[in-house]
Amino acid sequence: MMNKIENINKNLILRQMLYSDAMAYNKKFLAKPTDSNFNILKAFEGTEKVYAELELKVKSGECDTENCEFELASLAALQSAPKIFVEFMENLGGELSVTEEPNFDVVNNADYTIAQSMLTEKPGFSRSDGYEISLELLEDSSQEITFTGPGFYEPLIINSSTLKVLLNSGTFLIASTPDINKDMTRLLTEVGLFSPDMVNPETGELLETAKILDEFVLKNPDGTPIYEIVEIGNGKGRNILRYDLDKIERKTDPFINAEVAGLLDREQEAVASWNVYLAELTSVEEDDQMTQNATAYESAWQYEKVLPLSQSKKILFMDHYKKYFMKNYLVQFTTNQLPDVQEDAAVFDVAEKRKENAKKYMEQNKLS
Amino acid sequence: MPVPVAAVGAAVNLIGGLFGSGKARRAARRQRRLAKSLQKKLDHLERNRQSIINPYDNVTSLASMATDLSNTLSNPFANLSVATKAAEMKIEEADISLANTLDTLRATGAGAGGATALAQAALKAKQGVTASIEQQEKANEDRRAQGEAQLQQQVMSEKQRIQNISISEGAREQSAMAQGRAFEFNAREQREMQKLNRVAGQLDQATNNAAQASRDATSAITGAIGGMASSLSAGKSAGNLSDLF
């Protein structure tokens, strides 16, 4: 089994190379010829002759096998070969294209990234660089493609019928990473903390002016909000609202749980989400750099090892998903929120305010 | 043998087109998978949400708590007794007085006329006592009747009070049941509508995505075939096509 860290590093280097303009400045690369014609269709060379010979045998009744069984089967295989080839290339191309997605999980096998680079004629992955692709038409009508070259751990071999079966079963060869940012932005509008009029009907996202509903604001027994004083410098301060975080958690939990249940139903994508976003509980800004240098590394889950996901992994996933949501999406609505009452929102002198509060407390509690 | 330029172009067009349509087909597969997991999310949400409760289902009639106290009522004048002691004393006094008078008559040697007068006086005294008793008995009878009337009135009031409580509690219970059923109906209706809206939204989205992916796939493969055909027709004069296959 490939080494996880080595594979991550290989993928990171490949992605850096593919998205960098560095090759344009590589004089050695520019000087040598590049042959990117892997001539995959070479596998079909001579098949027209074989087909003609087989058909002649069948028509003339001069078959080598009883009732022309072999000849008829071979003819059928040759007839279906182009269709199988088209489908095979579609399936393979669709899968390998995942390696070019912006939030691609670099824990996926780096061999696929190389194969995609070869097929899409990226600089450095040509025949001139030692890479080869060969397609073989097998007797069972299936086709086998083999990628070789210096970047591979071992030749990458994929069979058309196996790939088809895999994809038809709803599994993917390479895991796509869900757009967690988009999902969580949507989830914010679904968790019951905001009124419907705070959602932009066109984008389905929260308006910039959106605020958490008043029922989640901590309040005094007389119904006035409990404020936290934040010093803003020069002895001045402002009131900011305090929220009942327990109540918020109780309200949001069922919705987050449902979201995670849906995501865990797509295990491959759940693992990709873990590796790219959730494992390290990084910030959104850090995640933007994830494919560069901030991937999960040690805490990343290797697909080959963790699937199917164990219960403990699912619980861990749920826990991190909630924390990530709170930390990166909800926190902006629960911190530094100014009061709705205009006079409470005004800037004040902190020392005076403290004195005033102390006096009020003493009066309320009949202390002197 | 060098590969003809047009043939290479055709092969590249074909592979590129296949990859493009493959990407679209993958997107469609992913959409289907996503729709399935969205359904799972919806199921989870519905399974784990609070069940619809009837907030009035524990409302019961409190009529049984009202006690009919009419059996504790009684006529306080039902058993009034006649004050006979005083009458008895009066009779005794009259008898003593009569005996003393008789002794005096004997001592003074009075005649029969005095005795007769004495007997009449005694009779009169006893008649007075009898009249007093009758008067008391009459007064008692009147008060007993009056008490009985009051008792009937009070029993009637108590029975009416209990009946009113029963009717009022029964009405409250029926009203609560009706409100509870209305609440359950509305809550269920609202949920059903929300569920329908969500599922409809998902279906629309999934259908649109699938249709778009299908169009993308068709467009990509059509483009590839078109590109290949034009490359090949251009290449007919340029080289040997069998080099391609």
Image (tube, coloured by chain):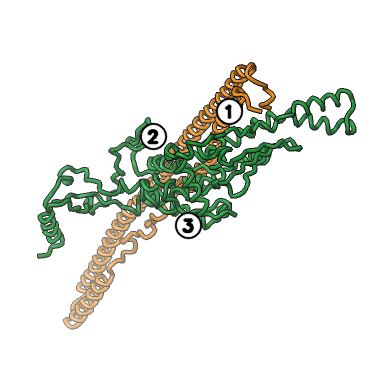
**Marks 3 and 1 belong to one chain:** no
From mark 2 to mark 3, how far is it between C-alphas?
A: 37 Å
In front of the other: B55 or A105: A105
B66 to the left or right of B117: right
Among numbered discs 2 and 3, the one appearing first in the sequence? 2
- Residue drawn 45% across the image and 48% down it: A276
From mark 1 to mark 2, how far is it between C-alphas?
A: 41 Å
Three-letter residue code for mark 1: Val
Residue linked to disc 2: A204
Three-letter residue code for mark 3: Glu
Q: Residues within 10 Å of mark 2 (few under 14, many from 20)?
A: few
Residue linked to disc 1: B12
Q: Which chain is green?
A: A
Q: Residues within 10 Å of mark 3 (few under 14, many from 20)?
A: few
A312 to the left or right of B66: right
Three-letter residue code for mark 2: Gly
**Which quarter of the rendered picture does the C terminus of chain A lie within?**
bottom left
In front of the other: B77 or A294: A294
Tell me the subunit letter for badge 2: A
Q: Residues within 10 Å of mark 1 (few under 14, many from 20)?
A: many
The secondary structure type at the circle numbered 1 is helix
Q: Is residue B162 visible?
A: no
| Displayed quadrant of residue B131 | bottom left
What numbered label is drawn on residue A298? Answer: 3
Residue B87 drawn above or below residue A230: below
A199 to the left or right of A172: left
